[in-house]
């Protein structure tokens, strides 16, 4: 069966510091991968998606970037965090119609 | 412009009764619809889906109804249980090149009272 891992679960970072969130998927090959953010009390905002290694599509202009160095690894990064980057970050995978989510990372930028 | 709308931010239901969560969409290109359930501080969990060629799909206590002419779908939970208390997201899917994107509603918070 497929599983998806995200770490860390919680992160507190100062403004201006770098960020690296990692997501890995097991049990499937060549999945589509997604990064979402959920701000407090809001819906899910798609940040990036990837249909293959090295292929990244950005949905919204922002302070973040994504990379897919391996088939089942998706990384969300920032060089300098802003206060507005605080939120709940979710990674998801799909091979067909439904998307399946990881446990999420709660990021607090102070 | 919100293409998928969940107009009720919250809903409160008595245990054992039916919960009905509603979702409206504007894009006629959507051909697949999904419902997700989300607990606080967890990722959304896929619940049930429906293709645009159907008008009903049932899975245990969960049934999704699709009315294409009205661009409306609903999720029925019967009987409702306290463990169903969560935020429910409606999502719609349309093909975008080699990928399928999900367009999400803002969610409805369901509280099932014992």
Image (cartoon, rainbow, N blue to C red):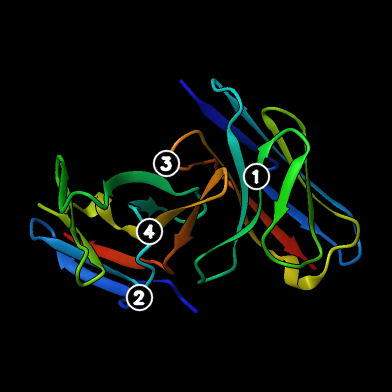
> According to the image, label 2 marks what residue?
B9
SS for dot 1? loop
Q: Badge 3 local density, few (<14 within 10 Å), some, or many (20+)?
A: some
Q: Write down the chain letter for disc 3.
A: A
SS for dot 4? loop
Residue visible at 81% across and 64% down in the picture: A63
SS for dot 3? loop
Q: Write down the chain letter for disc 4.
A: B
Earlier in the chain: of badge 3 and badge 1, it is 1
Nearest the viewer among B90 and B53 is B53
> According to the image, label 1 marks what residue?
A9
Where residue B110 sits, quadrant-wise, is bottom left
Instruction: Calculate the distance from the C-alpha at mark 2 to the C-alpha at mark 1.
Output: 27 Å
> According to the image, label 3 marks what residue?
A97
| Residue B74 spot, x, y in % from top left | 21, 62
| In this view, the mark in front (4 or 3) | 4
């Amino acid at each position: 069966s497929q599983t998806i891992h995200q770490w860390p679960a919680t992160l507190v970072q100062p403004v201006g510091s770098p960020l690296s969130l990692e997501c890995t998927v097991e049990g499937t090959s060549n999945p589509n991968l997604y990064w979402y953010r959920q701000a407090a009390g809001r819906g899910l905002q798609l940040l990036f998606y990837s249909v293959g290694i090295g292929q990244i599509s950005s949905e919204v202009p922002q302070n973040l970037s994504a990379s897919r160095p391996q088939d089942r690894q998706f990384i969300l990064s920032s060089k300098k965090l802003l206060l507005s980057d605080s939120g709940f970050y979710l990674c998801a995978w799909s091979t067909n119609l439904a998307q399946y989510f990881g446990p999420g990372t709660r990021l607090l930028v102070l | 412009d919100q293409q998928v709308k969940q107009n009720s931010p919250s809903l409160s239901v008595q245990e054992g009764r039916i919960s009905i969560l509603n979702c409206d969409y504007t894009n006629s290109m959507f051909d697949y619809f999904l419902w997700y359930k989300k607990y606080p501080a967890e990722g959304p969990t896929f619940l049930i889906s429906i293709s645009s060629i159907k008008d009903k799909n049932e899975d245990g206590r969960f049934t999704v109804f699709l009315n294409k002419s009205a661009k409306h779908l609903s999720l029925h939970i019967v009987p409702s249980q306290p463990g169903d208390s969560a935020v429910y997201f409606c999502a719609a899917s349309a093909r975008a090149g080699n990928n399928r994107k999900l367009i999400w509603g803002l969610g409805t918070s369901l509280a099932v009272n014992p």
